[in-house]
Image (tube, rainbow, N blue to C red):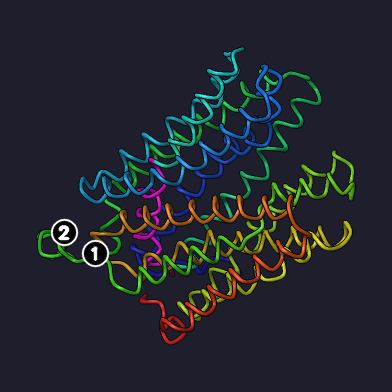
Amino acid sequence: MGPERPKNPAKAAAYRLIVLMGTVSLFGDITYEGARSITGPYLAVLGAGAAVVGVVSGLGDFLGYALRLVSGYIADRTRAYWALTFAGYSLMLAIPALALTGNWKIAAGLIVLERIGKAIRTPARDTILSHASKEVGRGWGFGLHEFMDQIGAVMGPVIFTTVLLFKGNYGEGFKILLIPAVLSILMLARAARKMPNPQNLEVSEKYRQFPGEQEMKALPRLFWFYALFTFFSVAGMAHFQLIAFHIKASRLAADALIPVLYIVDMAVAGGVALIMGRLYDKAGLRFLLAAPLLCLPVAWLSFTGGFALALLGVAFLGVVLGAHETIMRAAIADLTPVPKRGFAYGIFNMVYGLAYLVGGVTMGFLYDKVPVTGLVVFSVLMEITAIFIFLLTGFSRMKAQH
C-alpha cells in the first residue's frame, strides 16, 4: 500500500513536504513522548507530590489544546505558518533543559512550556499539511504524516527506558533527547526552504494575488456540527492513563508491562493511520462515522474483564487514536475555506482538548464512585450521541472535496 509514484511536479513536491514534515514530527515525538512517559516519576524524584504531578499534567494538556484557538487565529491573520511552527518546535528544547534543573518548580514550568509550544505550532503545521494533502489525498497525506509521527511516539519511551536501564539517571535521559529535538528543528528548516509557500499547492493564482476577496468567508455551518460531533466522539474515549490505572489497581499485570501497553497503543495508532487515510479518501466524509463506532467497545473491553480483554481494549484505543489523528484532521481541510483553515484547526483542537478533559474527569469520577458499568454506560452514550449528530447533519451523504 505504498504511495503511488507522483506523475506531476506538484504531487512530487507535496509528497516531499509531507515526508519532511513527518520526519519533523518523528524526531519531535521522540523528544516529548520520551519525556512524557517519565515526567511524573521525575517530578516525584524532585520532591513534588501527587497533587502537583496531577496539576502540572492537567494544566499542560489544557494549555496545549486551549491555546491552539489563539495560535490558529494568529496563523490565519499573519499567514506566518512557518514562523509559528518554528516557534512551537523551538520550545521543545524545554525537554532536554530538564536535565539542568534539580528543582521541581522549574521542572514543572519547563514541562508546561513544552505543551505551550505544541499549542503554538500545531494549527500552523496542520494547515501546511492540509495544503500538501490536497495533491495526494487528504486522508493519505495526514495518514502518512501520522504514521511517521507514531514511529517517534514509540521510539521515544523505548530510548528513554533504555537510557534509564543502562545509566540509571533521569538527567542522562533528558540529555539524550537534545539530539532528536535539534534534528527536528533542522528538518523543519529544510522543509521551509524547500517549500516556502505551501499554500501554492492548493490555492488558485487568483487567491494568491487577491486574498482579500476570500477573507470574509465564514466557517461553514457544517463545520460547527463537526465540532459538536468531535466533542462527543472524544468525550466518550477512555484514556490510556485510566486504563493503565485500572490494570495496576486490579492487579491484572505487573507494573513493568504497563509501559509496554503504551507502546502497543502508539504502535497500533501509527499502523492503522495509512489504512484509515486510504479509506477516508475513498469514502469521503462518510468514513468519519468510523471514529465513534470503533470507540464503542473500548471501555467495555478495558474495564470489565481480565488482562487479555484489557489488552484488546488498548489495541482498539490505538485504532481510535489513529482515526482521530488521521481522518478527523483531514476532514477539517475538506470542510473549511483556505483563509480560515488555521483558525478552524485551532477550534478543532480546543474542542478536542475540552472533550478530552471533560471525558477524563467524568470517567475518573465514575470509576471511583460507582460500579465500573457506570463508566462503560457513559462512554457508550457519548459515542451514540456522536453517531446521532453524524447521521442528523448529513455527513453520510457527503464526499470529501478533493
Magenta span includes 129: yes
Q: Which mark is residue 402?
A: none
Q: Is residue 266 visible?
A: no
Residue 248 visible = yes
Residue 203 is labelled as 1
Q: In this picture, which residue range is highlighted in magenta?
A: 120-137
Nearer-the-camera pick, 278 or 325: 325
Image location of residue 249, percent across then percent down: 84, 45
Q: Indicate the quadrant where residue 211 lies.
A: bottom left
Q: Is residue 175 magenta?
A: no
**Residue at the (69%, 37%) spot, across then down:** 157
Task: Name the N-terminal-most of marks 2 and 1.
Answer: 1
In this rendering, position of residue 256 left or right of residue 356: right
At label 2, the amino acid type is Arg
Residue type at mark 1 is: Val
Helix, strand or loop for disc 1: loop
The residue drawn where x is 48% and y is 52% is: 354
Residue 308 in the figure: left or right of residue 391: right
**Which quadrant is the N terminus positioned in?**
bottom right
Horizontal arrangement in the rendering, residue 317 relative to residue 106 (left or right)? right
Distance between the alpha carbons at the discs numbered 2 and 1: 7 Å
Residue underneath mark 2: 208
Which of the 4 quarters of the picture holds residue 207?
bottom left
Q: Quadrant of residue 30?
A: top right
- Circles 2, 1 touching at the beta carbon (< 8 Å): yes
